[in-house]
Image (spheres, rainbow, N blue to C red):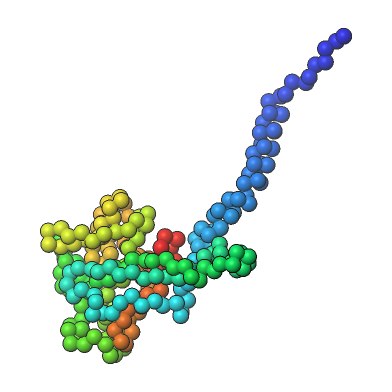
């Protein structure tokens, strides 16, 4: 009996099966990839944020009297309520839980702006002198002067989001990222290391009663306008 002979698989057939397998595999990975990357797509592509930042979403940080008058910042904590992008209402109803009860604590550095000398040392402190005599009841012009003189900085390094620390060196201080060595001055301006930009500044306002309020919106400088970075 003659043996049956199978047609050999050609190189073209092999490549065809490989391409087909790749296409099928890619199709099967789309749903789980979309689920995992959904929050990132919502924040970076669609411009959404998992933390509310509307006109009414302002949160009190502290009072002006708590901000150090000298060449030193002070860190405060603000609890932003979370409205998670992936916590859809239908999912919350099904599970019986709500994201409204959860918050994300954010560290915020406050200080008064300083002039920076050519050699990098700190010059004049720009803290308004009228703050020595009053702590509330400010006029509109006084509020404008205060806001133009106040640093309200995120604690997240502009490199990879690691938390920065204040480090004293030779009588003066600087912000240092302990993870990768990013360095900034008291105004949050880039000094050295891998960060591509200055520290993020919170969108903030000072009110008549002398309180400082922020919302989860950063000013990254340049022409980009307000930003809501993925790193909080």
Taking 32 as reference, is 91 above or below it?
A: below
Q: Return the residue nearer the eye: 158 or 86.
A: 86
Q: Is the N terminus in the top left, top right, bottom left or bottom right quadrant?
A: top right
Image coordinates for residue 30, horizontal then vertical, percent:
62, 49
Q: Quadrant of residue 175?
A: bottom left
In this rendering, position of residue 186 left or right of residue 198: left
As drawn, the residue found furthest toward the right would be: 1
Tell me the residue at 30%/70% (across/down): 76
Image coordinates for residue 36, horizontal then vertical, percent:
55, 53
Tell me the residue at 50%/62% (across/down): 43
Taking 155 as reference, is 135 above or below it?
A: below
Q: Is the C terminus in the top left, top right, bottom left or bottom right quadrant?
A: bottom left
Tell me the residue at 20%/83% (across/down): 131
Taking 189 as reference, is 55 above or below it?
A: below
Tell me the residue at 28%/68% (across/down): 75
Image coordinates for residue 39, horizontal then vertical, percent:
53, 59
> Is any part of residue 223 visible from this angle?
no
> Is any part of residue 142 visible from this angle?
yes
As drawn, the residue found furthest toward the left would be: 170
Q: Quadrant of residue 168?
A: bottom left
Taking 141 as reference, is 3 above or below it?
A: above
In this rendering, position of residue 199 left or right of residue 19: left
Image coordinates for residue 72, horizontal then vertical, percent:
20, 68
As drawn, the residue found furthest toward the front would be: 96
């Amino acid at each position: 009996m003659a043996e049956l002979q199978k047609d050999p698989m050609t190189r073209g057939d092999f490549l065809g099966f490989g391409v087909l397998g790749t296409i099928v595999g890619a199709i099967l990975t789309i749903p789980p990839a979309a689920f995992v990357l959904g929050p990132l797509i919502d924040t970076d592509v669609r411009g959404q944020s998992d933390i509310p930042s509307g006109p009414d979403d302002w949160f009190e940080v502290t009072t002006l009297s708590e901000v150090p008058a000298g060449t030193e910042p002070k860190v405060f904590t603000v609890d932003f309520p979370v409205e998670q992008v992936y916590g859809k209402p239908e999912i919350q109803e099904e599970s019986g839980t709500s994201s409204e009860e959860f918050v994300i604590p954010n560290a915020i550095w406050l200080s008064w702006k300083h002039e920076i000398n050519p050699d990098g040392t700190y010059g004049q402190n720009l803290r308004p002198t009228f703050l020595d005599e009053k702590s509330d009841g400010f006029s509109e012009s006084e509020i404008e002067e205060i806001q133009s003189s106040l640093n309200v900085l995120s604690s997240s390094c502009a490199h990879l989001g690691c938390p920065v620390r204040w480090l004293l060196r030779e009588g003066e201080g600087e912000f240092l990222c302990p993870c990768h060595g990013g360095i900034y001055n008291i105004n949050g301006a880039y000094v050295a290391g891998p960060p591509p930009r200055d520290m993020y500044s919170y969108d903030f306002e000072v009110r008549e009663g002398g309180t400082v309020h922020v919302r989860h919106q950063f000013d990254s400088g340049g022409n980009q306008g307000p930003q809501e970075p993925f790193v909080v």
